[in-house]
Image (spheres, grey):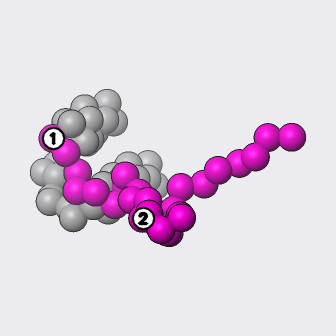
Amino acid sequence: MKNKHYCSDRSLYGATIKRKDMLPPTRIDIKYTKELFDGFDIHMDIPEFQTKNDLYNWRDRVIRRTFD
């Protein structure tokens, strides 16, 4: 039986594990978002976000709204 490991922002043996989705978005994230939107024929400006998670959630909502 395999153990499942989940990433969290909790202390582990005194060290803090930082989640990558809580970091600010990089230029590569923005570039990928633009390419993804082009694939869905979405043309809009991408606002600034504080975390990658915020960008991913916004991107998901925009794409879903396009098909509703």
Nearer to the camera, 26 or 16: 16
Tell me which segment is drawn in magenta: 1-27
Nearer to the camera, 67 or 10: 10
Horizontally, residue 46 falls left or right of residue 64, namely: left
Question: Do labels 2 and 1 touch, CB within 8 Å?
Answer: no
Give the spatial CA distance, label 2 vs label 1: 26 Å
Disc 2 designates what residue?
A: 16
Q: Which mark is drawn over residue 27?
A: 1
Residue at image point 42% right, 64% down: 16
Horizontally, residue 36 falls left or right of residue 49, namely: right
> The residue tagged with tag 2: helix, strand or loop?
strand
Residue at image point 14% right, 60% down: 48
Would you call the spot at circle 1 few (<14 residues within 10 Å), some (14-19), or many (20 or more)?
few
Q: Which mark is drawn over residue 56?
A: none
17 in magenta? yes
Nearer to the camera, 29 or 47: 29
Residue at image point 34% right, 60% down: 22
> The residue tagged with tag 1: helix, strand or loop?
helix
What residue type is disc 2 on? Thr
Per the picture, the main secondary structure of the magenta-coloured stretch is: loop
Q: Quadrant of residue 41?
A: top left
